[in-house]
Image (cartoon, grey):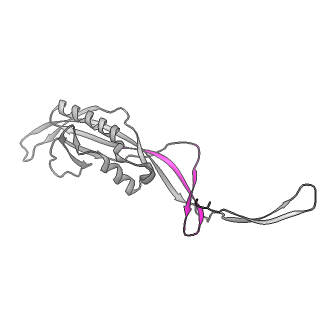
Amino acid sequence: MLSRSQRDAVLAGIPDELGGTSVTKYRDGHYGSLPSFPCLVIRGPQTSSRARYNGTLVKTVWNAEDEVYDEVNAVNQFTTVRVDVEALTEDEATDLARALVETVYSTKLGLDWFTDRVKLSSIPNPGLMLSYQHAIQGGSGHKKIYQMVVEIRVEYELGWDVVGAPMKEFETSIEVGDSEETIDGLIEYEHPEES
């Protein structure tokens, strides 16, 4: 599941100008009684799936306060955000959907893996054409709306701190060869000195 900051970064990266045309962005169903066209209706993020099946990623993060490395567990996941490009003509919907795909691929939604822990993965099968009848305000009939479906797949990191405190140091006793000599000592993680 995307964190709020990851979700907000993805949604902010979806453009509101496509091919020189200004489009209004709506979250699924949040446009009141009548949206303005053309528009983008954003649905999702959808359910997530595991990106890789090689187990949990354990990474170390420098903890400057304790001067040790902390361990963080994480998995990479995929999720999909569906963007419906809606317009009053089929040609306009097609042109705007193409501009959306080109913009998303060229800008990568403005995401930065190192700060957001989310990145563009792909746009699988863009351009499913649908249409529906939208009621005209006042009940005077219906208007045909053309809709192009563009699904944007992103990869993100779902991370959590290790529940138990990670081992930072331990004592050891090492026997030297066949002799009865032993070396006792303390082994601890240390941050390399800055040069």
Q: Position of residue 114 (x, y in %)?
A: 45, 51
Residue at x-position 15% and y-position 42%:
37
In the rendered image of this protein, does residue 116 appear above or below residue 89? Answer: below
Q: Position of residue 23 (x, y in %)?
A: 19, 44
Residue 1 visible? The answer is no
* Residue farthest to the front, as pictured: 195
Observer-nearest of 139 and 61: 61
Residue at x-position 66% and y-position 63%:
167
* Residue farthest to the top, as pictured: 91
Task: Let me know if residue 56 is in the magenta part.
Answer: yes
In the rendered image of this protein, does residue 188 appear above or below residue 99? Answer: below
Residue span colored magenta: 53-80
State the image quarter where residue 168 is shown.
bottom right
Observer-nearest of 98 and 138: 98
Q: Position of residue 73 (x, y in %)?
A: 56, 55
Q: Which quadrant, please, contains the C terminus? A: bottom right
**Magenta-highlighted stretch: main secondary structure?**
strand
| 28 lies left or right of 187 | left
* Residue farthest to the bottom, as pictured: 65
| 93 lies left or right of 171 | left
In the rendered image of this protein, does residue 85 appear above or below residue 62? Answer: above
State the image quarter where residue 94 is shown.
top left
Residue at x-position 52% and y-position 49%:
75
Q: Position of residue 82 (x, y in %)?
A: 32, 42
Task: Let me know if residue 129 is in the magenta part.
Answer: no
Residue 155 visible? The answer is yes
Residue at x-position 14% and y-position 48%:
34
Q: How many marks?
A: 0
